[in-house]
Amino acid sequence: MSQAFSDDQLAEMRDTFSIFDKRGDGRIEAPAVGDVIRALGYNPLQSDVKKLVDSFGGRDKRISFEEFLPVVQKFSSKAHQDQHRYEEFVEGLRVFDKDGNGTMNSAELRHVLTTLGERLTDDEVEQLLAGLEDSQGHIAYEEFVKIVMSN
């Protein structure tokens, strides 16, 4: 499994892993997996960490570096990172979903896109939102995120 990482990357991972090895036995406690992954620069969801801990046999289980390595590969994969970004974008737009029905007001989305972060021009926003607005002026934000991420 370690073929996907360079020798330098493996050394960095091993060093980081060893920082969390409190007993010096080459193992970490399962709940520390999320902390090690974060220390390596990835940003797993808490729900993903909980699933990992459960898959290792619970909070009392200690895991080796060899057991840990496939986990890092999963979080370093482009597909996983893309899915995580998708979930973050959707969660960020969900705050504008006042009715809880998966849509948001297109005027609010236009405002966000033209005033926050890397601001888009009005023309760029119009191109981006073309055909996505329903008759009430709402946009299905999950579909919007899928379209933006596919481009």
Image: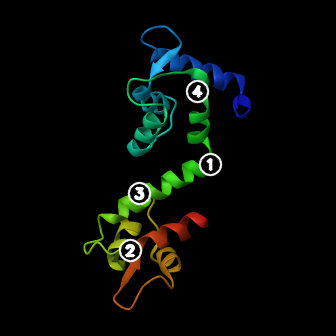
Three-letter amino acid code of the residue under disc 2: Arg
* Label 1 crowd (10 A; few <14 / some 14-19 / many >=20): few
Q: What element carries label 1?
A: helix
Three-letter amino acid code of the residue under disc 4: Glu
Q: Name the residue under label 3.
A: 117
Q: Which residue is drawn at 30% across and 68% down?
A: 96
Q: Which residue lies furthest to the top in this view?
A: 24
Q: Where is residue 105 in the image (x, y as percent from the top left)?
A: 32, 78
Q: Mark 1 points at which residue?
A: 78
Q: Where is residue 108 in the image (x, y as percent from the top left)?
A: 32, 73
Note whether 34 is above or below 91 in the view shown. above
Q: Earlier in the sequence, mark 1 or mark 4?
A: 4
Nearer mark to the viewer, of 4 and 3: 4
Q: Name the residue under label 2.
A: 110
Nearer mark to the viewer, of 4 and 2: 4
In this rendered view, identify the residue nearer to me: 12 or 56: 56
State the separation of the CA atoms marked 1 and 2.
29 Å
Q: Name the residue under label 4.
A: 67
In this rendered view, identify the residue nearer to me: 102 or 1: 1
Q: Which of marks 3 and 2 is nearer the N terminus?
A: 2
Q: Residue at x 50, y 16 (%)?
A: 27
Three-letter amino acid code of the residue under disc 3: Gly
Q: Which of marks 4 and 3 is nearer the N terminus?
A: 4
Asked whether the residues under the numbered discs 1 and 3 touch, taking CB atoms below 8 Å apart as contact, a structural biologist would say no
Q: Where is residue 122 in the image (x, y as percent from the top left)?
A: 45, 76
Q: Which residue lies furthest to the front in this view?
A: 57
State the separation of the CA atoms marked 1 and 3.
24 Å
Note whether 34 is above or below 134 in the view shown. above
Nearer mark to the viewer, of 1 and 2: 1
* Label 4 crowd (10 A; few <14 / some 14-19 / many >=20): few
